[in-house]
Image: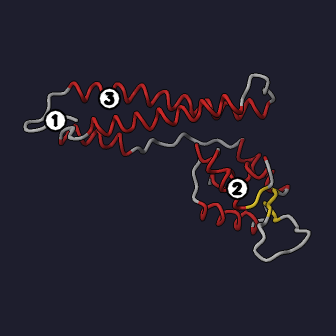
Amino acid sequence: MSLPHAILTALLEKPSSGLELTRRFDRSIGYFWSATHQQIYRELSRLEEAGLIRALPSEVPVRGQKKQYEVLAGGSAELARWVGESQDPKAIRDPLLLRIRAAAVVGPHGLAGELRRHLDLHRRQLAVYEAIEEKDFPPERDGDEDRLRRLVLHGGIGLETFWLRWLEEALGEVEDMAPPSGGTVS
């Protein structure tokens, strides 16, 4: 249910074409709510059919021209309703956690290398978030909208920081284990 709300949010921030919207998802919203380009275009059609958004009228209709979408009053009302709605946190479903649990049964063959790879990925993502904060959120940007957007970014920074600490702990544990007979833990 959240993809339509992510799209409504993005369109309320700035009316956009489907292509512009997919690019914005790739650069910002996609860091915490990912969607394929096909999912975004499909959802735009559904939102338009539901009367929550509309394609802006074009001054000169041209075949193949990008439609610009804007949110209608019903879309704003739906987004406001959704913001205030209660929702329980989602359960974690991470293959790495399951892989570690499986290693308890079959041994940690190759697990250290995978943990190192994940450490590198999370370090890179943290660097991306920190660069976004430095570029897009200087101290003087303290309006309510910026403060809320910064909160989302700080959530991402906090999650990456958590993963880095936890992965370093996990790697230390795995590297400290006796290698299985005939092999290494890495």
Residue at image mark 2: 21
- Pick whichever of labels 1 and 3 is earlier in the sequence: 3
Q: Amino acid at mark 1?
A: Thr
- Pick whichever of labels 1 and 2 is earlier in the sequence: 2
Mark 3–mark 2 Cα distance, whole angstroms, equals: 38 Å
Quadrant containing the C terminus is top left
Q: Amino acid at mark 3?
A: Ala
Mark 1–mark 2 Cα distance, whole angstroms, equals: 47 Å
Mark 2 residue element: helix
Mark 3 residue element: helix
Q: Nearer the viewer, mark 1 or mark 3?
A: 1
Rendered residue at 64%/51% (across/down): 25
Mark 1 residue element: loop
| Looking at the image, residue 147 lies above or below residue 75 | above
- Residue 74 position, x and y percent, is 82, 57
Q: Residues within 10 Å of mark 3 (few under 14, many from 20)?
A: some
Q: Amino acid at mark 2?
A: Leu
Quadrant containing the N terminus is bottom right
Residue 170 marker: 3
- Pick whichever of labels 3 and 2 is earlier in the sequence: 2
Q: Nearer the viewer, mark 3 or mark 2?
A: 2
- Residue 185 position, x and y percent, is 19, 34
| Looking at the image, residue 122 lies above or below residue 49 | above
Residue at image mark 1: 184
Left or right of 84? Residue 60 is: right
Q: Residues within 10 Å of mark 1 (few under 14, many from 20)?
A: some
Q: Residue furthest right?
A: 59
